[in-house]
């Protein structure tokens, strides 16, 4: 930039701080606003090719219908469609079946929603997935009927359409045959995929189950509530807060990894607490910055940089200026 002040401000731009906080390229598709509920639907209405069962999440079914070109059984057909086209077609599919849910896209980067949707990374990278479907078998009230089918339908699409291999997919379902989707097991699955994923890899996270809201604990939520996922043992182990997902899944994922998350649950609009959002409601035309994104950890890092600069002889007023722009 030609001067010390400009250099310091440049390296501490908002996006630079986001890049340092979230090294990976992360996208999340959710089926509704934070204040909306999602639906367990008769997915035969969505005309998916050979669905796993009659019941399923409306959000998952609406997206798969787009991926399969409205029932033509061509899983690659969506390639080249823009993010906004895919989300608006999702909303059209939902509305056609009587659902009022409004899909949202959240991202770790400010992306042009008119650009082609991208969910595959380098061809040489490994494709991995964590798929979670919870029917809450035996819970009364609260038992669901379609979440296992969601996982089976997504698994079929990932394998048949995108070339994922079963050995790189970790499935958690309360069906007596798979790993139980307890709080501990879900967090361990997230830890696993973070630890094994390398630059160039593709990651897919799918959650189908109950979502909730709890009073915010740290003041980073504009509405005063944390959005949550509900593991099978939520009554004893607690719910998984959006802050936990940000800390354990989003932030530690390596630079160069492309991660797409599909959250089919109530109150899921910003459940990953990502810095940019787009609402496919026909009234928004681009991504908007989430002014409540928590950059407190980067604040500490920035102060460390400022201290190092001061120790190297950089004038104190540069440190003051950095603190102001943070």
Image (spheres, helix red, strand yellow):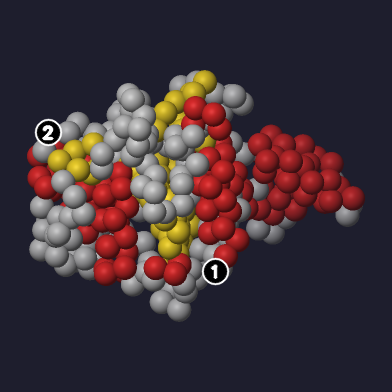
Image quadrant of residue 55? top left
Q: Position of residue 198 (x, y in %)?
A: 56, 68
Q: Quadrant of the N terminus?
A: bottom right
Badge 1, how many Cα within 10 Å: few under 14, some, many 20+? some
Q: Position of residue 209 (x, y in %)?
A: 36, 39
Q: Quadrant of the C terminus?
A: top right
Image quadrant of residue 138? top left
- Element at badge 1? loop
Q: Position of residue 153 (x, y in %)?
A: 26, 56
**Chain-order first, disc 1 or disc 2:** 2
Tell me the tag on residue 98. Answer: 2
Q: Residue at x 49, y 23 (%)?
A: 214
Q: Is there any visible trace of residue 76 in the rendered image?
A: yes
- Element at badge 2? loop
On screen, residue 41 versus residue 13, left or right, reads left
- CB atoms of marks 1 and 2 within 8 Å: no
On screen, residue 249 versus residue 232, left or right, reads right
Q: Is there any visible trace of residue 281 in the rendered image?
A: no
Q: Residue at x 28, y 49 (%)?
A: 150
* Disc 1 target residue: 199
């Amino acid at each position: 930039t030609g001067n010390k002040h400009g250099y310091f401000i440049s390296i501490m731009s908002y996006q630079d701080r986001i890049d340092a906080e979230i090294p990976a390229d992360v996208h999340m598709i959710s089926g509704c606003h934070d204040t909306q509920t999602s639906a367990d639907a008769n997915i035969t209405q969505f005309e998916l090719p050979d669905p796993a069962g009659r019941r399923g999440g409306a959000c998952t079914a609406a997206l798969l219908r787009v991926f399969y070109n409205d029932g033509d059984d061509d899983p690659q057909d969506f390639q080249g469609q823009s993010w906004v086209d895919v989300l608006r077609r999702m909303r059209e599919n939902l509305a056609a079946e009587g659902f009022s849910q409004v899909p949202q896209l959240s991202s770790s980067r400010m992306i042009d929603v008119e650009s082609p949707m991208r969910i595959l990374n380098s061809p040489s990278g490994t494709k991995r997935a964590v798929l979670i479907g919870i029917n809450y078998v035996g819970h009364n009230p609260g038992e669901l009927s379609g979440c296992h089918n969601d996982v089976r339908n997504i698994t079929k699409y990932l394998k048949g359409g995108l070339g994922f291999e079963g050995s790189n997919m970790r499935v958690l379902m309360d069906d007596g045959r798979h790993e139980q989707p307890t709080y501990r097991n879900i967090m361990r699955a997230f830890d696993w995929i973070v630890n094994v994923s390398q630059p160039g890899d593709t990651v897919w996270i799918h959650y189908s189950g109950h979502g909730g809201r709890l009073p915010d604990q740290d003041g980073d939520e504009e509405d005063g509530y944390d959005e949550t996922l509900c593991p099978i043992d939520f009554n004893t182990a607690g719910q998984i807060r959006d802050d936990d997902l940000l800390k354990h899944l989003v932030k530690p994922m390596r630079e160069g990894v492309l991660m797409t998350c599909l959250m089919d649950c109530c109150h899921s609009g910003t459940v990953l607490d990502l810095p940019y959002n787009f609402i496919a409601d026909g009234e928004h035309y681009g991504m908007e910055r989430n002014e409540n994104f928590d950059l407190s950890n980067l604040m500490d890092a920035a102060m460390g940089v400022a201290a190092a600069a001061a120790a190297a002889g950089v004038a104190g007023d540069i440190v003051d200026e950095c603190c102001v722009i943070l």
